């Protein structure tokens, strides 16, 4: 079993190097856990990452927790999560505090007018990348599946945008509708096969 | 609002979403109508989240700091730390039920709705102060540049900030 200190050091380095969001971090984690220390197998890495897409909250944190547990038990979890988060949380707080100190300058206010659409554009890109896989999967399963996926996506966006339902209500409704559709479709498929 | 209230709202939002970004829609609808945070605080926190290293989901820590100072940042950290711990239980449970059609359908429905609501909130943030051509062009520019992993996010934000400063 790998020592917790090596894990802590490795994940600390991942934490300070992972500028630019998830994909860089994933690459760094893979290099450290699979290629360098070999404490996680190739297969395990892929399976764990898929599983973390189901976990609530930040997928990358769930991934750190799961890999840490498999590599070195509870102490491994602590080492990976502290290593990953400690430097980045400190930097996030420092950046925010620095921003608060300068935000009243007119130049900063003008710059923010341009940064708003920039942040929204990057956010929309993230949403697009998140949505691509489920929509592509639906497309592979057939026309009805694709229509249903697009319907869920568009209707939840519209319901929230015009403000007729709360976010929680939209999410719960979509889960229930999804579960019903999944059950009905599997029954129909079974009947068609029989 | 106390750090503990902030913690509870952020915990609920993280539990009900997946990905670092999925909680933006519930937090926005919890905080803005009550006057606890403004649209601009959301944009500022999201920007800091894009700029700082580590998971993008840390934008919530920045929001906590902007709302309540260091204690807000602390409350936010704990709130986003707890939900991913459920992965240990999810791992055990999911291997048993993952192929049940109702579970598959439920997870898929939730995922799609999370993405839909995120798009809705981002659109609200963009259109809050009125829409003009420059705003739309900058949104498309950032979307397009973000597509290339080689271009650092810092450069994209800096470019948009400079354009905003120049066209004031």
Image: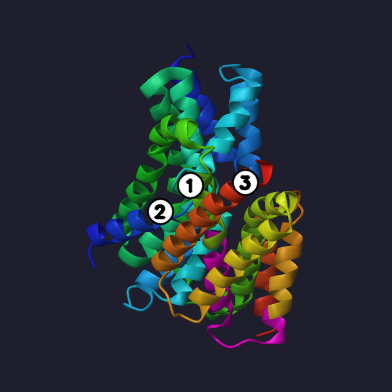
Q: Position of residue A132 (x, y in %)?
A: 69, 55
Q: Kindly indicate the quadrant of the structure image that contains residue B115.
A: bottom right
Left or right of residue A166, residue A7 in this image: right
Position of the N terminus of chain B, as image quadrant, is bottom left
Local packing at callout 1 (Cα closer than 10 Å; few below 14, some 14-19, many 20+) is many
Left or right of residue B138, residue B67 in this image: left
SS state under label 1: loop
Q: Are marks 3 and 1 on the same chain?
A: yes
Q: Residue furthest front?
A: A194
Q: Nearer the viewer, mark 2 or mark 3?
A: 3
Residue at 42% across / 41% down in the picture?
B84
Q: Is B134 part of what is drawn in magenta?
A: yes
Q: Residue furthest top?
A: A1
Q: Position of residue A113 (x, y in %)?
A: 60, 78
According to the picture, the residue beneath numbered tag 1 turns out to be: A58
Question: Looking at the image, do the residues carrying marks 2 and 1 touch, with CB atoms under 8 Å apart?
Answer: yes
Left or right of residue B69, residue B152 in this image: right
Local packing at callout 3 (Cα closer than 10 Å; few below 14, some 14-19, many 20+) is few
Left or right of residue A47, residue B59 in this image: left
Q: Say how the picture is coloured.
A: rainbow
Q: Are marks 2 and 1 on the same chain?
A: no
Which chain does tag 3 point to?
Answer: A
Q: Which residues are magenta?
A: B114-135
According to the picture, the residue beneath numbered tag 2 turns out to be: B14
Residue at 51% across / 35% down in the picture?
A63
Local packing at callout 2 (Cα closer than 10 Å; few below 14, some 14-19, many 20+) is many
Residue at 53% across / 69% down in the picture?
A156
Mark 3 or mark 1: whose residue is earlier in sequence? 1
According to the picture, the residue beneath numbered tag 3 turns out to be: A191
């Amino acid at each position: 079993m790998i020592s917790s200190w090596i894990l802590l050091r490795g994940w600390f380095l991942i934490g300070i190097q992972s500028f630019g969001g998830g994909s860089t971090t994933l690459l760094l984690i893979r290099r450290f856990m699979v290629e360098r220390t070999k404490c996680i197998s190739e297969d395990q890495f892929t399976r764990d990452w898929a599983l973390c897409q189901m976990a609530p909250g930040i997928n990358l944190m769930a991934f750190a927790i799961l890999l840490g547990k498999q590599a070195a038990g509870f102490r491994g979890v602590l080492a990976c999560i502290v290593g990953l988060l400690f430097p980045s949380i400190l930097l996030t707080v420092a950046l925010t505090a620095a921003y608060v100190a300068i935000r009243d300058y007119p130049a900063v206010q003008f710059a923010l007018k341009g940064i708003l659409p920039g942040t929204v554009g990057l956010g929309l890109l993230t949403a697009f990348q998140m949505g691509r896989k489920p929509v592509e999967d639906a497309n592979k399963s057939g026309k009805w599946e694709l229509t249903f996926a697009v319907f869920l996506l568009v209707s939840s966006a519209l319901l929230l945008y015009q403000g007729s339902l709360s976010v929680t209500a939209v999410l719960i409704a979509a889960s229930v509708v999804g579960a019903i559709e999944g059950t009905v479709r599997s029954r129909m498929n079974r009947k068609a096969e029989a | 609002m106390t750090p503990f209230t902030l913690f509870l709202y952020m915990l609920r939002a993280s539990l009900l979403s997946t990905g670092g970004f999925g909680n933006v829609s519930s937090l926005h609808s919890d905080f803005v109508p009550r006057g606890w945070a403004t649209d601009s605080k959301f944009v500022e926190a999201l920007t800091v989240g894009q700029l700082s290293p580590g998971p993008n989901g840390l934008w919530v820590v920045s929001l906590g700091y902007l709302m309540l100072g260091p204690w807000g940042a602390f409350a936010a950290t704990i709130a986003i730390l707890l939900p991913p711990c459920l992965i240990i239980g999810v791992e055990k449970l999911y291997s048993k039920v993952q192929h049940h059609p109702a579970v598959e359908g439920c997870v898929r429905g939730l995922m799609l709705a999370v993405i839909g609501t995120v798009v809705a909130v981002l659109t609200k943030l963009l259109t809050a102060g009125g829409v003009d051509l420059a705003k739309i062009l900058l949104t498309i520019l950032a979307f397009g540049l973000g597509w290339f992993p080689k271009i650092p996010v810092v450069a994209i934000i800096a470019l948009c900030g400079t354009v905003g400063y120049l066209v004031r």
